Amino acid sequence: MSETSGAPRRRRLPATIRRAKDVDARVGGREVAAHDEQPPAVVDAHAEQKSERQVALIFLASAACTVGFAIGYVAIGLKNINDVELSNYVLGLTLTGALGFLGIGMVLWTKLLMPHYQVTEERHPFASPDADRQEFAEVFNQGLDELGLVRRPILRRSLLTAAGLLGVLPIFMLRDLGPKPEKTLFHTRWTKDARLTDIVSKQPVKVGDIEIGGLMTVMPEGVAIEDKNAATSPVILIRLRLGENVPYKGREDWAPEGYVAYNKLCTHAGCPIGLYEQQTHQLFCPCHQSTFNVLKHCRVVFGPAARPLPQLPIYIDDQGYFRARSDFTEPVGPSFWERG
Amino acid sequence: MTTPASGMGSGPIAKVVEHQAKTLDDRLGLADALKRNMRKVFPDHWSFLLGEIALYSFIIVLLTGVFLTFWFEPSVKEVTYNGSYVPLKGVKMTEAFASTLNISFDVRGGLLIRQIHHWAALLFVAAIGVHMCRVFFTGAFRKPREINWTIGVILLTLALLEGFAGYSLPDDLLSGTGLRIAFSIVESIPVVGTYVGFFLFGGNYPGPQFIPRLFTIHVLLLPGIFLALIGAHMIILVRQKHTQFPGKGRTEDNVVGTPLYPGFALKTGGFFMLVFAMCALLGAVAQINPVWLYGPYNPSQVSAGTQPDWYIGFLDGALRLMPNWEFPIPGGYTFSFNILFPAVILPGILFTVLALYPFIEAWLTNDHASHNLLDRPRNRPNRTGIGMAMMSLYIILFLGGGNDIIADKFDLSINTLTRLFQAGVFVVPPIVFIITRRICFGLQRRDYDTIHHGHESGTIKMLPTGEFVELHVPAEENERIFIIESAATSHLPQVDEAVEAQRAQDAIEAGHVRGRNYGNGRGRPPGATAAAALETTRRKILSFFYEETPVVHDDEHDPTKSLTP
Amino acid sequence: MTDTNAAPRRPISRRPISAYLVIVIALGTIGFLYAAVAPSGRAATSSSQEDLVVKGNQLFLQGCSSCHGLQGQGSEVAPSLIGVGAAAVDFQVGTGRMPLAERGAQPLEKTPRYTQADIDAMAAFVQSLGGGPLVPRPEEYAASGTTPEDLAEGGELFRTNCASCHNFVGKGGALTHGKYAPDLTDTTPKHVYEAMSTGPANMPIFGERTLNDEEKQRIIKYLVHIRNMPDPGGNSLGRIGPVSEGLVGWLVGIGLLVVATVWIGARP
């Protein structure tokens, strides 16, 4: 570097190339690839000065953006959503400028003001020389011999046993991550005679609360969706025209006065199914498009779900409220191994 | 730094640097390692910068992620929101969701950093994808770089997990639905699925423990593994040096390009700033993951158009396109193939094959040589065809994951679309394979043309006979060398007749070449049958996929023969 | 519309004399005010109402009866209109869905073919056929005077009942076989209200006891608030979730960065 750094505006390009060659020669194994060497172009000191100013200006633009960011940060408080919008634009765009100008400046620096040359680096095969391999093998084998791993099978096996057991230990310690599934997946929070209540207003649902072609998401009375193990309990109560429902065998009295209740979780991947097409009588899952025919005990008519939605047996009590006859008679939601 | 003090410059800056360098080197002795590595050569071709997008977006994700942890509360404790986002005031939600709203609406610059974090995460995975494409289609994964390719595939897999974990943390309606699906996928694993699910989530879904656990995985476990693997990726890269395209002065035994210090360092530093600026720009002008619009998670609610982030889209698409095959297992068990296959088995196979691809290709083509010169995709029509076919499969699955949005925005029937995509999974990849090969051959012919006739000049000349001809200008020397060398280096290893004959003989002796009767099948050593079967399979796959048909058979016109100087 | 006056005359339980007095005075005042405001109201309303029905009947015979039947009894190609109510007519014709231009998966929204006066007439006629939900009064669907409680509950109701088809902010979504839940961005509050109470096409009916008047209004207030709300994070990208985000990430993000790599890699 000494040879060039002290000089005034000079013909930097060829000088640097020469220097690069020297450095590379010293480092060893590298030299300037002759074909890529640029012809020692006439360096226009004026043009170079111009480029220098240009890059410096770009850097200053970046600095200005950073200052703008700071001003924006201090000046814009977050009182309402419009402030948040303004703040995000101001901070974001100034940050973009601060980073972007810096980046553009740096790249232009290399493009306009630095010598362009390519160096060639020799590769050496990765494989170690045979002698090295040999030596390694000897050292390694000697070590093995000193250890006596081969000679002392009892030692070897007992060590492996101990280490293996120790390796299993962490898996044991993960046991308390959660409870065993037990029968959790086989039950919901529905119980015999539980009233069906609107999930938002928590009001019990009566006959006539739903129009024909209407539906409502309901929960067992007294159970909120946030409660423990309640996430599988939401039920959609749909009112069909009288006589439209084609009950599954043995479920003739599960749909009083055309009201049917099905679990809201898709039997495919457990998304809540809320899309009810009241003319085609289909429930449609927005996640993976499984489609269920509500008239025919919610059997699958399209999509990746394999099983019908579980039906909640319901009846109407003396005061006209809907009540569950029991919990679901099968596990709800997606399939699992022990499901049967 | 390379030599004692006299080698340094004489300016004031140089003096300070020299002093510091001396102080450090006296204690650490770094000069030797630095002098060797600071002139590491980086090829100039733009495609070598694609991996850097991934590296830099990872750094950005790391920086912005640290900022977010200062306010984020990974807790499912229920709170009543009372921040400045009016429409959710008084709504019960988890602390995780409330603190995300807090970051977005009450921390200055919080929304910006959140959005930069998310955009950088999307770019991170996307950049890994394009980087992988570059490495795949140019054959940069071949020996000696197989290990680095495998590390890269592991990084991609972890990036998907890491992204999904981050997407799930705010506990909004959209990500909660995604987690619900994730739980169902775990549940579908035979025998242990429910146990694994309950242990992971701390009970039945949604589980009281999952957000804090996910947080630990997202900010500690996976980033730690990332740092280690990215470190290994880089060290191996430096050790093995870059690949390069063929060209004048470039051989298998060298690498030509810009040295790290100073040229490339400044350039790549600038590029880091540009990647960061891109993320900041997107964070400033394009809203991402507006959780306040989605609302807090509630297991009874769902939104139309529920989608994962793009990089999980292909898995969601596979789930959507899968037929509803679920099998009862005698003894009261259920095998949910409709979930297990698309969500566990398929990605398992895809990523395993991807991770092992370099070894598979080497085995099939019998090419065990080291390669430092890259292939041009056109010169390896079969590999290029396979890559494009796999990409088309990926894209179909990806589009399948957005079938509801596509149906809605383009007024199509979602049922028809789903059926089309289902058929497409089987029909499109082979067609793409064939078309890609054809295009490659066409490009090879054009290369041949360029070598022999040069480029069309656009000048039409009338001959004395009245005939019109277009003048051609010969291709430049560098281009000619590039084309010829590429074609020459991309040929598969010459079939060694002796080796092949021996292999055939081995197979024959094992009595397993179909259509011929070699009688004596008895008394052969155990394992020979399997070896023979494997060899037969290898040959079949090879002849189907990899036998490269030279475009120009005529020796006289073979550019590699007639034009090599 | 017609029976608003009937509302105060509810059976009254036994109360002290003073209560009767208050009611008598109140009724008297209301009657007096009513007479003052609308001197010839009663007769005029009644006759104009009849005129309206007659006019509506004529329009119906010209424009609707070929499918829906002369008495609105329906046919093989069109549903019965008995009992669908004025709200259904106001929604279907007011949003241009009816009359149907072509048979498709579901009626499409178009520029209305009729003036609001004609629509009112047809609505009155259909209402006369067999009752049903009335066209809501402006104060029932007005989205003014919104309080945070309105938004909190409206949002909860919207996400529970509406979002699964219309998406989290009402941008619409796909249903089976080419049907769709429409984008609600430009739907007037009145039409949103009518859609909830009448359940057009495949939309479920949210009757008065499923979602009461106040709940419906809160849903409307939430919807209107959200759709007018700025997107603090920049361009909304359509508010349709991660699909458009992924598209932007690839096309803009990766696209521009690849351009940058080419620029950086180019020889000067």
Image (cartoon, coloured by chain):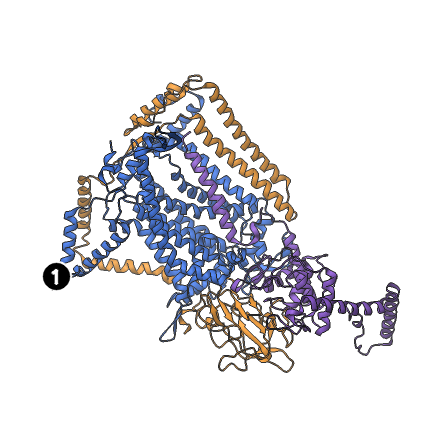
In the displayed image of the protein, which residue is found farthest to the front?
B465
Residue type highlighted by circle 1: Tyr
User: For this view, does B334 lie left or right of residue A237?
Assistant: left
Q: Is residue A189 visible?
A: no
> Where is residue B90, by image quadrant?
bottom right
The picture places residue C92, in percent across and down from the top left corner, at 66, 64
Q: Residue at x 23, y 57 (%)?
A: B537
Write down the residue under mark 1: B518
> Where is residue B454, by image quadrant?
top left
Please name the color used to draw chain B: blue
The picture places residue A96, in percent across and down from the top left corner, at 53, 38
The picture places residue B317, in percent across and down from the top left corner, at 44, 58
Q: Which chain is purple?
A: C
| Relative depth, front residue between C37 and A149 | C37
Please name the color used to draw chain A: orange
Which corner quadrant holds the C terminus of chain A?
bottom left
